[in-house]
Amino acid sequence: MSNKKNDRRTQILQSLAQMLESSPGARITTSALAKQVGVSEAALYRHFPSKAKMFEGLIEFIEESLFTRINLIIQEESNVVSRIEVIMKLILGFAEQNPGMCRLLTADALAGETERLRVRIAQVFDRIETQLKQIIREADLKQGLRPAMGVAPCANFLIAIIEGKIRHYVRSEFKVKPMDIWQEQWEILAQNLMLNR
């Protein structure tokens, strides 16, 4: 029984993500979501006590997908610039593969929803920025490199690029992909990111 319940929860979250992708700018109602899943609204609430909890389920998926892989990258990639590149590529690639999630990452889909959800999304970006700061700090110790503009400004600049590309993707209704022309952009960025001590 519990497996069936988990399957239904997953189906609800997948439908919600699909609706976020297929209806850019539209507010998602529980009645429309129930119709998409093929269940009653009451059945939705048996799996999630509120719409906010459904959005939280998607945010948990984002956190798990990104931070599990970021931790692996930190363990596996020793070169600092490569580490930053792989992390940025991971986040932009995840965004491109999950357009509906981008509406959450930009908080576009959270207008009119509980403040707690917007705080949670802000925390996702704060965590990524903290990880980038840590990586940039280690550059000096491990490779004798220092950021061209200081640790905090450098990490903040990288986050601004990530957020900007995701926001552009949402604003273009998923036509301008985050990975489009990224390689050319990264090459210029990488050349100017770190300086030798």
Image (tube, rainbow, N blue to C red):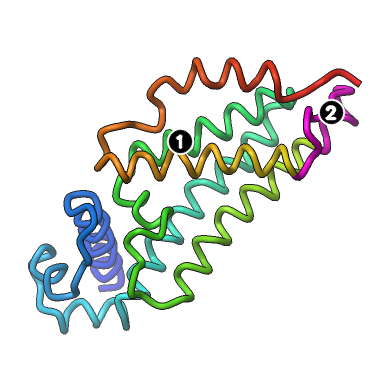
Q: Tell me the quadrant of the picture where the C terminus can be found.
A: top right
Q: In this view, does 39 lie above or below 84?
A: below
Q: Is residue 60 above or below residue 147?
A: below
Q: Which range of residues does the magenta coloring cover?
A: 137-152
- As shown in the figure, which amino acid type bears the numbered disc 1? Leu
Point out residue 79 in the picture as x, y percentages from the top left corner: 73, 23
Name which quarter of the figure residue 16 lies in. Answer: bottom left
Mark 2 vs 1: CB contact within 8 A:
no
Q: Which residue is painted at 54% across and 37% down in the image?
A: 161
In the rendered image, which residue does mark 1 sit on?
A: 92
Q: Is residue 160 above or below residue 45?
A: above
Name which quarter of the figure residue 190 lies in. Answer: top right
| Mark 2 or 1, nearer chain start | 1
Residue 139 placement, left or right of 193? right
Q: Which residue is painted at 78% across and 33% down in the image?
A: 149
Q: Is residue 51 above or below residue 109?
A: below
Residue 100 placement, left or right of 29? right
Tell how many labels: 2
- As shown in the figure, which amino acid type bears the numbered disc 2? Arg
Q: 180 or 100: which is nearer to us? A: 180
As drawn, the label of residue 146 is 2
